[in-house]
Structure formats: C-alpha cells, structure tokens
C-alpha cells in the first residue's frame, strides 16, 4: 500500500505534496488522540469494574459477619469446647458380645 501511495504522489506538485503531507499528519494526530481516549476509557472502565468487585466483596463479607454476630455465640462455643462424655455400652450389646465370646471359647475347648 505504501508503494502505491508513493507512485500516486509522483505526479503531484510540491505544494500538493505538502498539502497531502499536512493532511496525513493531521489524520495521524486525530487517530492517535482517538486511540489515547479509547485507552483512557478502557482504563477507567477497568477501575470501575475493580471498584464494583471490591464493593461486592466487602458487602458479602459484611453480610456474613452480620449473620455470625446475630446468633448466640456463647452456647455454640460451650458446646464445641465440651469434652466428650465417657462411652456407655448398652446391656443388650454387652450380653451379645459375651455370648459370642462364650461360643468361641467353647469351640476352642472342644
């Protein structure tokens, strides 16, 4: 494309070439300004998105904290820190275990 542009300006006068160059420089300035504006707008949008995400994360954490603080913490802490009670066996299970043990002992002696 550059070669085509060079060929097309061969027949122009010096003033026409200067005008063309001036117009190209102006077009480049406009395009560069638009690119900068787009870059700034994109950066601002990213900042807004990050702020929105941060706000949502804070709101979510605050809601979780409010939920935890609204419940009675003392009773749960007492239950969680309580030592487990001693294991108690039910008499039926104990009798069954004794019967099984007696059967094994009888087999060994027989």
Image: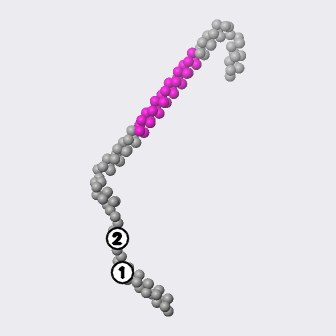
Q: Circle 2 sits on which residue?
A: 86
Percent x, y of residue 103? 45, 87
* Residue 35 position (above or below residue 52): above
Residue 102 falls inside the magenta stretch: no
The CA span between labels 2 and 1 is 18 Å
* Circle 1 SS class: helix
Magenta segment: 26-54
On the image, the x and y values in percent for residue 91 come to: 34, 80
Q: Residue at x 28, y 57 (%)?
A: 75
x, y percent for residue 31: 56, 21
> Is 98 situated left or right of 36 in this image?
left
- Which residue is located at x 48 percent, y 30 percent? 43
Q: Secondary structure at mark 2?
A: loop
Per the image, is 41 magenta? yes
Q: Which residue is mark 1?
A: 92
Number of the label disc, if any, that sits on residue 51: none
Q: Is residue 98 above or below residue 30?
A: below
- Residue 67 relative to residue 97: left or right: left
Majority secondary structure of magenta residues: helix
Please indicate whether residue 81 sits to the left or right of residue 44 in the image. Answer: left
């Amino acid at each position: 494309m550059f070669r085509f542009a060079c060929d097309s300006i061969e027949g122009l006068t010096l003033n026409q070439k200067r005008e063309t160059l001036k117009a190209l420089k102006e077009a480049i300035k406009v395009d560069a300004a638009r690119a900068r504006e787009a870059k700034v707008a994109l950066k601002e949008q990213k900042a807004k998105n990050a702020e929105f995400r941060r706000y949502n994360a804070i709101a979510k954490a605050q809601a979780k904290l409010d939920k935890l603080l609204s419940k009675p913490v003392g009773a749960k802490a007492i239950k969680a820190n309580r030592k487990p009670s001693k294991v108690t066996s039910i008499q039926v299970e104990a009798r069954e275990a004794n019967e099984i043990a007696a059967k094994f002992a009888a087999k060994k002696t027989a």
